[in-house]
Image: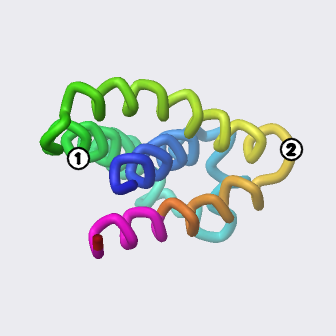
Amino acid sequence: MIAAGLLYLGLFTLAAAMPRHGPDLLGRWNAPPLAARLPVAGWMLLALSLAASLLTPDWPRALVAWFGLAPLAAGIVLPGLTFRAGLAQGAVLGAAALVVAGSLV
């Protein structure tokens, strides 16, 4: 759950770092100092999600699951980029809840 949440957050952050999508996804939070740090934060979140997968006892299966979750997470970000940014923004709350729930278990 932690890896899936971090993976989505990383892909959302990378999408928000793009000049074309940033204003739609971030809204009033799209400030130049924040936007300059978003690519680094996105790649760090992706690396953390991969590390969370590799640190499990059954890491080979978790690694395959991580590669399967990547297009799924991107598929959740995509409707927010093409139709309504509210979909992708709402999924950020769900991804954060996955990370919190996974850390409590």
**Relative to 104, 51 lies left or right:** left
Quarter of the image for the N terminus: give it.
bottom left
Task: Find residue 44 and report its image quarter.
Answer: top left
Amino acid at pointer 1 = Ala
Tag 1 and tag 2, C-beta contact below 8 Å:
no
Element carrying mark 2? loop
Q: Residue at x 66, y 42 (%)?
A: 76
Q: Check residue 99 for magenta coloring.
A: yes
Quarter of the image for the C terminus: give it.
bottom left
**Relative to 85, 88 lies left or right:** left
Q: What residue is shown with label 2?
A: 83
Nearest to the observer: residue 80 or residue 31: 80
**Relative to 100, 12 lies left or right:** right
Q: For the magenta stretch, what is the residue range?
A: 96-104
Q: Residue at x 38, y 51 (%)?
A: 6
In this rendering, the answer to whether 30 lies above or below 13 is below
Task: Find residue 50 and report its image quarter.
Answer: top left
Q: What residue is shown with label 1?
A: 52
Element carrying mark 1? helix
Residue 64 image point, x, y percent: 35, 24
Q: Residue at x 36, y 51 (%)?
A: 37
In this rendering, the answer to whether 34 lies above or below 77 is below
Amino acid at pointer 2 = Phe
Total numbered labels placed on residues in the image: 2
Q: Residue at x 65, y 42 (%)?
A: 77
